[in-house]
Amino acid sequence: MKCSLGGNFSNGELVPFGNIEINPSAGVLNYGQGLFEGLKAYRREDGNILLFRPKENATRMMMGAERMCMPSPSVDQFLQAVKATVLANERWIPPPGKGSLYIRPLLMGTGSILGLGPAPEYTFLIYVSPVGNYFKEGLSPINLLVETDMHRACPGGTGGVKTIGNYAAVLKAQGAAKAKGFSDVLYLNSVNKKLLEEVSSCNIFVVKGNTISTPEIEGTILPGITRKSIIDMARDQGFQVFEKPVTVDELLEADEVFCTGTAVVVSPVGSITYLGKRVTYGSGGVGVVSQRLYSELTRLQMGLVDDKMGWTVELK
Ligand code: PMP
């Protein structure tokens, strides 16, 4: 595999995947100045390659960079680097319907800085890997534990950007939940502990009748690109969709719950455990709304249906 490595964001080169050299006093190693993105490339039946909403990733990286005091590639530089990296790795893209190529752009302070401050130099690189399902359950329902002690974000913090430290912050709760047999953790708002935030690496939706609700974006949860897409798709299908504060009670009384993200796509939630009480949705199988949205989204991403939303980008 190869990755693209560019110091000033525009004259990157393709180099074989491998270790990179980094100064021990680099900003990213000492002060966590790092951001990443995640997107996928799909192989279409006719051999073309599709990216899903890559401009949204570029824009989110730019917004995150502003919060983390880093310069960032422009949208065009980001897209060019992603396209070049994917095309150079075309042979690693699974056949249609067999998975996708996960693309991981990284932006980090690689300049040396001993006293606290922004690093003097930055590196933008991209690496890729073929992937299948994120959760071992696939489209089978996952079981979430609501975390009532630890939080991944606080108001005014960095929860709304894709910075590396946010992921270090979830490892402990996630590890403990997995050790007890749960698939992942659902976090609560650190101020109002009756409000939902998100899962370690995906956004959450609750379904009640014809209504679908998801926590609003207020700086403590990641503005997911899949979240945004599912909101539009569900509205298009006639659902009433609300971005609003969503309570634990709404979660426990929902007809159906699902998570969204680039890696997880749409993952149905089979059960939620809150303060030792387990609530199972429906018969514990895949809910009809989750199934419908999953099918529609994946068909669009794989190029099996007309992309009337204009969300996919052809690489060839
Ligand atoms: N929340 C968190 C914390 C995430 O890491 C992700 C994955 N990027 C998401 C939500 C979903 O975002 P997206 O749909 O853009 O992948």
Image (cartoon, rainbow, N blue to C red):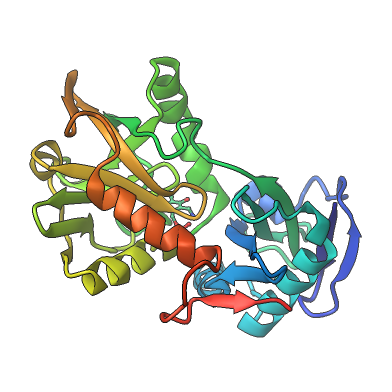
Residue at the far front in the pictured view: 46
Corner quadrant of residue 286: top left
- Is residue 283 rendered to the left or right of residue 108? left
Q: x%, y% of residue 254?
A: 12, 42
- Is residue 235 rendered to the left or right of residue 44? left
Q: Nearer the viewer, residue 218 or 98?
A: 98
Residue at the far top in the pictured view: 180
Who's the residue at 38% across and 62% down the image?
A: 296
Q: x%, y% of residue 173?
A: 40, 28
- Is residue 136 rendered to the left or right of residue 83? left
Task: Give the answer, above or below, for where 244 lies relative to 315.
Answer: above
Q: x%, y% of residue 183?
A: 41, 29
Corner quadrant of residue 210: bottom left
Who's the residue at 13% across and 42% down the image?
A: 255
Is residue 122 visible in this depiction of the protein? no
Q: x%, y% of residue 251?
A: 15, 41
Q: Nearer the viewer, residue 149 or 250?
A: 250
Who's the residue at 29% across and 64% down the image?
A: 217
Ligand 1 resides in the quarter of the picture at bottom left
Is residue 131 visible in this depiction of the protein? yes
Who's the residue at 53% across and 55% down the image?
A: 163
